[in-house]
Image (cartoon, helix red, strand yellow):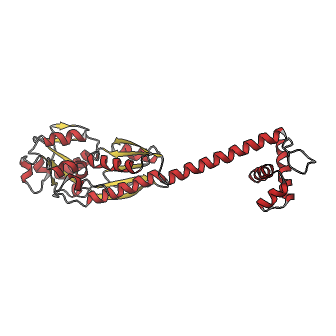
């Protein structure tokens, strides 16, 4: 009732006549008069001066007229902003990415996205998989990326691509001469691994138990950058998914060798969000670009060579 009453009153006051408002809106004059009367009764004041052929507003009528005009302006502004969001002109995206994925490849993906969408702000958190799942469930982030396929029923896995854990070392390291590496092989070399509780390390520990082997890293760090750098220095082997070191593999400062264990060979990277959460506008656009990038990177063979530009190409 209120929307119609405000609309009829506003048009009649703007045009100066209920008859003209009737012709514009396409309803009877009596309907316009009745709606204005109901609006006055609800507010307890007269909005128009009675006994005149043309409409003249009372002081109260002028307040209501100005109020509704501001409402129309605000509504138009809201619709314009919503349209901008739909067109990905403005917005803010929050992501949580697993500890093993931060590298130049992802940096380039986000840089390319913001070059195409300069009004979009992005916040990126790096946490363990369990914490990322919690943040996704509580809507603290739009999108999560983890190193497994979650079995949480309230999580939707938008995309899962095969991304095996690989042994990485400098090209002059003795392990680089091997075509593939077993867990037993790893016991013969100095290792740099993430702390317990990180998904990479947890996956390795399960594999160790099956093989009845215990890996004892010489260096433990939560920094993927340090893991890459110390491996490049030539003394240690580290274990990472390929997408964590695309730049180093492309330039040849690191080489990757498959780890011969069924669980390590079939680990996956998953893009997730909360089941039922509608991702529109900017988050939906970035999610689509991340899907394309992951599919592209997952298709690169472990032994692929080529320029860093080719291997880091953002679709």
Decide if residue 177 is in sight here. yes
The residue at 68%/45% (across/down) is 71
The residue at 24%/45% (across/down) is 201
The residue at 84%/61% (across/down) is 28
Residue 69: image quadrant is top right
Q: Give the camera-side residue of 104 and 111.
A: 111
Q: Give the camera-side residue of 163 and 89.
A: 89
Q: Considering the image in quadrants, where does the C terminus appear?
A: bottom left
Q: Position of residue 159 (x, y in %)?
A: 36, 58
Q: Position of residue 288 (x, y in %)?
A: 39, 57
Q: Where is residue 203 in the image (x, y as percent from the top left)?
A: 25, 49
Q: Where is residue 223 in the image (x, y as percent from the top left)?
A: 25, 38
Query: 310 left or right of 237?
Result: right
Above or below — where is 5 with respect to 121?
below
Residue 291: image quadrant is bottom left
The residue at 77%/39% (across/down) is 63
Query: 219 left or right of 122?
Result: left
Number of numbered callouts drawn: 0
Q: Give the camera-side residue of 4 and 226.
A: 4
Above or below — where is 237 with respect to 301?
above
Query: 139 left or right of 186?
Result: right
Q: Give the camera-side residue of 140 and 31.
A: 31
Decide if residue 212 is in sight here. no
């Amino acid at each position: 009732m209120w929307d119609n009453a405000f609309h009829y009153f506003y048009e009649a006051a703007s045009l100066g006549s209920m008859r003209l408002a009737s012709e514009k809106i396409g309803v009877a004059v009596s309907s316009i008069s009745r709606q204005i009367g109901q609006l006055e009764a609800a507010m307890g004041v007269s909005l128009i001066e009675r006994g005149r052929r043309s409409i003249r507003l009372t002081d109260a009528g002028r307040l209501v007229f100005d109020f509704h005009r501001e409402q129309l302006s605000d509504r138009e502004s809201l619709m314009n902003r919503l349209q901008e969001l739909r067109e990905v002109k403005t917005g803010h995206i929050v992501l949580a990415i697993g500890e093993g994925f931060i590298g130049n490849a992802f940096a380039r993906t986000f840089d390319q996205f913001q070059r195409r969408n300069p009004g979009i702000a992005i916040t990126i958190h790096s946490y363990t998989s369990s914490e990322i799942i919690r943040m996704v469930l509580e809507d603290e982030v739009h999108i999560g990326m983890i190193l497994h396929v979650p079995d949480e029923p309230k999580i939707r896995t938008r995309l899962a691509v095969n991304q095996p854990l690989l042994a990485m070392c400098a090209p002059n390291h003795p392990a680089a001469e091997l075509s593939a590496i077993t867990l037993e092989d790893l016991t013969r070399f100095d290792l740099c691994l993430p702390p317990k509780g990180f998904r990479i390390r947890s996956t390795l520990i399960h594999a160790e138990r099956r093989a009845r082997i215990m890996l004892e890293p010489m260096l433990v760090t939560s920094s993927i950058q340090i893991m890459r750098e110390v491996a490049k220095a030539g003394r240690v082997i580290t274990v990472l998914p390929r997408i964590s070191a695309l730049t180093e593999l492309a330039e040849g400062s690191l080489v990757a060798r498959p780890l011969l264990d069924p669980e390590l060979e079939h680990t996956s990277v998953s893009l997730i969000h909360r089941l039922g959460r509608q991702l529109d506008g900017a988050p939906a656009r970035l999610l689509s670009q991340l899907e394309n990038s992951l599919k592209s990177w997952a298709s690169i063979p472990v032994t692929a060579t080529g320029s860093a530009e080719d291997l880091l190409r953002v679709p």
